């Protein structure tokens, strides 16, 4: 099956689920987002796509090697409990390789744009900035009055993201934090806020996801939307996702395989 046909079916099923559920006033946000995503052939608005995808291409053509501290599942995708939350894995990687492997592909980043556009959040939390591609899609969708707090463990990577933000959004409010997700989530600057959208794109290990979920739900407004990347990346992620969606804090959820979307009560 062609990927676009596959995504079309997923979006159609998710939309039908929302339409047939109760509390449609709240669920219209995701209904409208999924519909717009599908109607626009899994792209954002043309001017937004052009700006961000030109930036993505420039990153893909940049072969400079940079240092990074990986707080995720580690080298070769093998999780280490010792380094799970705090220590991280030092490594080197080219900008082009990291961009291809870690920046969200256009079709999925476009869904983030449409969710932000129809939710119109006051504040967004992102765990996993990378070079800021997903951040940019959400910022364009949310509008100039929204504020984003975005976190990445790799300082050199975050410095490039900051340059990208200054280029795309010279007068908008994007706050960057360097460190492990767990460390930053406990900072006073984060704890003092309430978020309408949270996007988790990093540290793809089930134990970590479950821990972040328990912290983040305390930081979100009622009817907030939580988006989790790579919910089926490995067995531990699948298991944690299946447990999380059973939480009493979850009003409903959508499993698009690549992404999981939760609306909180």
Image (tube, grey):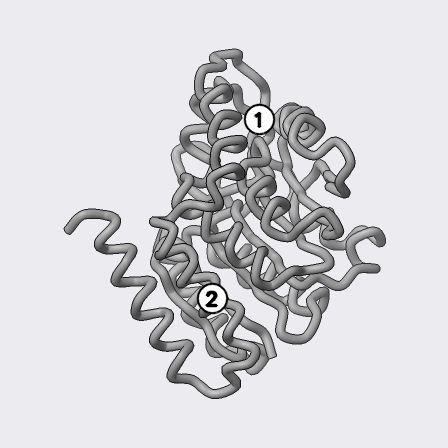
Q: Nearer the viewer, residue 251 or 36?
A: 36
Image coordinates of residue 202 in percent, x first then y, are: 53, 45
Task: Return the residue found at the far top.
Answer: 64
Q: Is residue 263 left or right of residue 101?
A: right
Q: Nearer the viewer, residue 186 or 103?
A: 103
State the mark number for residue 32. 2
Which image quadrant is residue 122 in? bottom right
- Residue 15 sits above or below residue 184 on the image: below
> What residue is rendered at 38% in x and 84% in y?
20
> What residue is rendered at 52% in x and 19% in y?
92
> What residue is rendered at 60% in x and 42% in y?
135
- Residue 30 sits above or below residue 123 on the image: below
Q: Nearest to the eye among marks 1 and 2: give it.
A: 2
Image coordinates of residue 33 in percent, x first then y, are: 47, 61
Residue tagged 1: 90
- Quarter of the image that includes the C terminus: bottom right
Q: Who comes first in sequence, dot 1 or dot 2?
A: 2
Image coordinates of residue 167 in percent, x first then y, are: 67, 26
Q: Residues within 10 Å of mark 1 (few under 14, many from 20)?
A: few
> What residue is rendered at 18% in x and 47% in y?
2
Q: Nearer the viewer, residue 146 or 244?
A: 146
Let me know if residue 155 appears in the view: no
Label 1 and label 2: CA atoms lie apart by 42 Å
At mark 2, the secondary structure is helix
Let me know if residue 152 appears in the view: yes
Q: Do the residues under discs 1 and 2 have CB atoms within 8 angstroms?
A: no
Image coordinates of residue 239 in percent, x first then y, are: 40, 65
State the mark number for residue 101. none
Q: Is residue 214 left or right of residue 32?
A: right
Task: Return the residue found at the far bottom.
Answer: 22
Q: Residues within 10 Å of mark 2 (few under 14, many from 20)?
A: some
């Amino acid at each position: 099956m062609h990927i676009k046909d596959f995504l079309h079916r997923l979006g159609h099923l998710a939309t039908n689920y929302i339409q047939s559920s109760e509390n449609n006033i709240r669920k219209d946000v995701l209904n409208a987002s999924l519909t717009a995503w599908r109607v626009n052939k899994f792209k954002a608005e043309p001017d937004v796509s052009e700006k961000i995808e030109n930036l993505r291409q420039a990153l893909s053509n940049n072969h400079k090697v940079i240092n990074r501290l990986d707080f995720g599942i580690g080298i070769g995708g093998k999780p280490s409990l010792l380094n799970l939350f705090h220590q991280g894995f030092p490594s080197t990687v080219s900008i082009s390789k990291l961009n291809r492997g870690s920046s969200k592909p256009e079709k999925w980043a476009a869904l983030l744009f449409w969710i932000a556009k129809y939710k119109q959040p006051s504040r967004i939390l992102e765990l996993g900035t990378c070079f800021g591609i997903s951040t940019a899609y959400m910022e364009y969708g949310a509008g100039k009055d929204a504020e984003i707090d975005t976190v990445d463990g790799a300082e050199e990577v975050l410095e490039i993201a900051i340059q990208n933000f200054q280029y795309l959004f010279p007068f908008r409010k994007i706050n960057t934090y360097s460190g492990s997700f767990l460390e930053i989530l406990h900072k006073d600057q984060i704890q003092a806020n309430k978020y309408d959208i949270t996007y988790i794109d990093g540290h793809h290990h089930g134990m970590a996801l479950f821990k972040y979920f328990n912290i983040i739900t305390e930081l979100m407004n009622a009817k907030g939307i939580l988006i989790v990347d790579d919910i089926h990346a490995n067995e531990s992620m699948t298991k944690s996702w299946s447990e999380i969606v059973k939480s009493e804090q979850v009003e409903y959820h959508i499993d698009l395989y690549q992404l999981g979307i939760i609306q909180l009560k």
